Amino acid sequence: GQQLNQSPQSMFIQEGEDVSMNCTSSSIFNTWLWYKQDPGEGPVLLIALYKAGELTSNGRLTAQFGITRKDSFLNISASIPSDVGIYFCAGQSSRQGAQKLVFGQGTRLTINP
Amino acid sequence: DTGVSQDPRHKITKRGQNVTFRCDPISEHNRLYWYRQTLGQGPEFLTYFQNEAQLEKSRLLSDRFSAERPKGSFSTLEIQRTEQGDSAMYLCASSLLGYEQFFGPGTRLTVL
C-alpha cells in the first residue's frame, strides 16, 4: 500500500544531541501527524499539524508542515534516553471524506549514554 | 485510564482457526479505525467506522476479515481461516473529529 518516504531509517546519537527526521510524499496531505512507538506498544501521538507552513512545538519536540503540503519534519532537541524508540510520520489525505492515515516506514532512534 | 483499550494483547493460533479481537475506543470518540502493522513497517489502514457505519475498507481487508461496531461503541475484528501471512500487530485507533487519531496498545497475532 501507499506509504510515505521517511528518512533516515535509523539514527545512532549521543545523549544530549539534537535529532532531525523528515517525511516526504508524492501526494498532498491536509494533516500531518508524528507518532512515537515503543516495542510491543501502539503509536503515541506527539504532534499534529493542520496548516501548510505551520510550526508546532511540544516540549523538546518541534515539527513543521511543509509549504508544498507534501512534506514534514520533526526535530528533537537535547535528546534523553527516554527518546529511544521508533518515530512515524503520518499524513491524512486531502480527499473529502478520506479518514485513513498513511504512515512512513519509521525512523528508529538509538541513544548512546 | 480513559485511552483506547484492546483485548487480547497477544493471540497465538493455529493456521485455519478463527480469531476475534476487541477494541474499546475513548468514550466520546465516534470514529474508530483498524490498522495492521508488520515487523519493520508503519501501520497500514484496514477499515474505518463513524458511529456504527463502516464507511471505508482497504483492499487489504480480504473476504476472510470482517469488522463490526454494532452499537457505535466497541468494535470487533474477526479473521476467519487464519493464514501465516496474517501474523501482525492489529492496532485500533479512535478520533473525535477525524484528525488526531489515538491508538490502543495493539493485539499481536501469531499464526503457527
Image: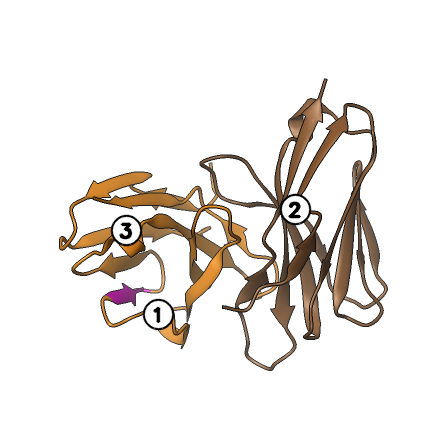
The letter of the brown chain is A
Specify whether disc 2 shares its chain with disc 1.
no
Q: Which residue: 56% across, 64% down?
A: A101
Tell me the element at label 2: loop
Q: Nearer the viewer, mark 3 or mark 2?
A: 2
The circle drawn on residue B52 is 1
- Which class describes the residues within 10 Å of circle 3: few (<14), some (14-19), or many (20+)? many
**Between residues A74 and B82, which one lies in front from this camera angle?**
B82
The reply to whether callout 3 and callout 2 are in contact (CB within 8 Å) is: no
For label 1, the crowd category at 10 Å Cα-Cα, with few meaning under 14, some 14 to 19 and many 20 or more, is some
Q: Could you give the CA–CA distance between mark 1 and mark 3, rounded to whole angstroms?
A: 17 Å
Which residues make up the magenta segment?
A: B65-71
Using the image, name the chain to which the residue with label 1 belongs: B
What scheme was used to colour the molecule?
by chain
How far apart, in angstroms, are the residues tagged by discs 3 and 2? 31 Å
Q: Report x, y in % for residue B24.
A: 37, 50
Instruction: Give left or right: position of B98 versus B49.
Output: right
Question: Which chain shows up in orange?
Answer: B
* Residue annotated with mark 3: B21
Is the residue marked by circle 2 packed among few (<14), some (14-19), or many (20+) residues within 10 Å? some
Q: Which of marks 2 and 1 is in front?
A: 2
Q: Which label is found at residue A9?
A: 2
Question: Type of residue at label 3?
Answer: Phe
